[in-house]
Structures are given as C-alpha cells and as structure tokens.
Amino acid sequence: MATKIYIDQGHNPVNPNAGAEGNGYREQDITFEIGRRLAAILNANGFETRLSRPTEDTQLGNSVSSSLAARVGGANSWGADYFVSLHTNASVNPQASGTEVLVYSQSSPAYELARSVLEQLRLSTGLRSRGVVTRPGLYVLRKTAMPAILVEMGFITNPEDASLMVNSPELFARGIADGIIDFVRRSVPSFSPVQENAELLGELENNSGEVKDEEDQIYDADENFEAFIAENSGMGSLKLQAFRGEQAFPVSGVSARISRKIGDSYYIFFEGETDESGIIDGIELPAPPIENSTEYGRPNKAAIYILSAKKKGYDTIEREIEIYDKIKTIQPLRMTQRYGGIYGTSDNS
Ligand SMILES: [Zn+2]
C-alpha cells in the first residue's frame, strides 16, 4: 500500500492566516508552489499525497486556529502516514539564512524524518542547515495523529534565500522529496521496489528544470521493470544471517539492502535491519521460473541482485547474490569490525 503523505502548504492566500512577507514575496505563494511540486515528485515515486491547498485560491478556515485545525483535520481523517508542513522563516535580521525542521519531540519517528529531509534539502539547495528543532507547542505538530514535521525552508527576509525559494522551487521540492523517500525506504522494510529517485530526477532535471515530462520518463522506466518481472515470474526467498568472530556472535542492526539495475535505473527490492539474532528472514525476490526439464528441481538460471550490508563500526559488505525460483538461499554476512575494535569510533560514514 502506498505511503500517504499529507502536504500542508503553510498559510492562506489572504487573511486570516496569511503568511509572512519579505523581499516583495509572500510566504503563502512559496509554500503553495513548492507543495504542488513536492506532491508531483512523491506521486511519481509511488506515494499517495494530499495537499492542504489543492488550488491557488483555496482558503482554509475563518480564523488562524480554524485554518490550522482544517489542515490537521484533513490529515487525520484521511489517515496520512506522515504530515509535512511547509513554511518560510522570518527574522528582523536580513542576514539570517538557512533551513530548519521542527518536530514535536526527539523521541518521535518524525525526528529521523526531519533529519533526513534536512540533509537532502541541504544537498539540493545548498542552504545552510540550522538543525532539527523541538517545538512541542506548535499546533500542527501537537494535534496531528501521525509523525509530523514543519519545514522552515529558508528565510523570506533574506534576499538570497527568498530568491532561491521563488526562482528554484524545484530544488526545495526535490530535497524534501528525497528526504522523505530515503526515510521511508529505511523504515519500511518490505518487498516494494521503488525506482531510485536520484536517477529519475537527474533525467527530469536535464529537461531544463521542468517536471512536465515526468509521466513519459516514469512510463519508460516502468516498462523496463515490467519486462524484468515478466522474465522473472518465479520467486525465491532469502535469509540473511549477520555474525562476527570465530564463535559467530550474531550482529543485530545491520542495514541490508537488495537492489539491482534494470534498464538505466536502480531498483530497491528490499531494505531492512537484522534482528537480535542477526537475522532477516523471508525476503522474497523475483527469479526466473524453473524450467520443466530441469532435473532434481534445481533451476539453472538465477536472478542476480546486489546485496549491501552495513553497520557503524564494521566494514561494509557488498556482493552479488543469486536467487533461484522456489529455493531458499541463506547468505551469511561475516561482519568485520574496523580497526578500532568493539569500542572503536573509527566509523565516520
Ligand atoms: Zn509560516
């Protein structure tokens, strides 16, 4: 089932609850446009989205509080998985610049989502990261029934920030989308291949920054994937077992990812973490179907995937694996600690 993202484009077109102004721009226009683009990118990546302001003149509520309540109510009644509110920051100091993401508390899953969004925004826009800030008092963070973040994308009062948000809205939409996609892939281990976003967006961007052609791009990519599935109509399963040392102590919390290139795009087939016993079991992967003629039920054709396994303090494993129809493969992951040893802090990834 598609992950549902409620995108709240902060503020109303006019008062009550109109946004901040600076450098001749209005916050509500910036949040509307970036929200619209964010939804397009997420939809193209298999998410389901809903916008608080689907059209430019959507006006919510008849007071600030009822405007906020309408946004939260929209997300809650829809059953959104995540709530993302878009805003621009403001300061009396025109030099103040950068991005920050607000969350209800550090112990919410929203905190990790916020970090992911912040990092991808920094990479995409080049604006300074001001960090994740805990703001339990904010209505939209407090009243939402799902993990919620409020993104202060940049300062409307800063000439550079403001002009970047107005003239390059796609950079912000893309950064936020990448952050959401990365986070969701890490936290929802399941067999749901998703096209690697960076590749796709790279192609879109070559199109002079327009997202117009994304339907075509997705269609091509999906065709390759459909062909792959048709050729690999069988299903093999995989068990991963991570351990270290001569006595094979289990290693928990190893992040495993199984992917492969299809056409020009990378698809992720599985992401997850090893449990207390160092195990991930029951991973199902497409494989070429067993031929009738094959003796002893042993298929001679396999689907090749790339397995990568990483954990802080250990060397990363990356290898090709073969998956056969109707066969359960066990992949041992011998984890080698880096030179710092158990108490080492040599990891800087
Ligand atoms: Zn605002």
Image (spheres, rainbow, N blue to C red):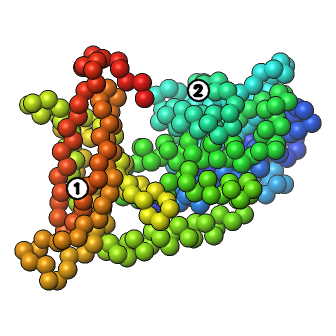
The response on whether ligand 1 sits within 8 Å of label 1 is no
**Is residue 301 shown above or below 34?**
below
Residue drawn 51% across the image and 69% down it: 222
Q: Secondary structure at mark 2?
A: strand
Quarter placement of the C terminus: top left
Identify the residue at the far right of this view.
24
Name the residue tied to disc 1.
238
Residue drawn 59% across the image and 38% down it: 120
Give the amino acid type for the residue marked by disc 1 in the picture: Leu
Residue drawn 92% across the image and 36% down it: 24
Mark 2 or 1: in front is 1
Q: CA distance from mark 2 to mark 1?
A: 37 Å
Viewer-side residue, 84 vs 60: 84
**Horizontal and vertical percent position of residue 88:** 76, 34
Q: Earlier in the sequence, mark 2 or mark 1?
A: 2
Residue 143, labelled with which disc? Answer: none
Residue drawn 25% across the image and 26% down it: 337
Identify the residue at the far bottom of this view.
293
- The answer to whether marks 2 and 1 mark residues whose Cβ atoms lie closer than 8 Å is no
Q: Is residue 48 left or right of residue 283?
A: right
Mark 2 crowd level (few <14, some 14–19, many ≥20, 10 Å Cα): many
Indicate the quadrant where residue 50 lies: bottom right
Residue 132, labelled with which disc? Answer: 2
Viewer-side residue, 9 vs 219: 219
Indicate the quadrant where residue 205 lies: bottom right
Q: Is residue 263 visible?
A: yes
**Is residue 292 shown above or below 297?**
below
**Horizontal and vertical percent position of residue 265:** 49, 59
Q: Secondary structure at mark 1?
A: strand
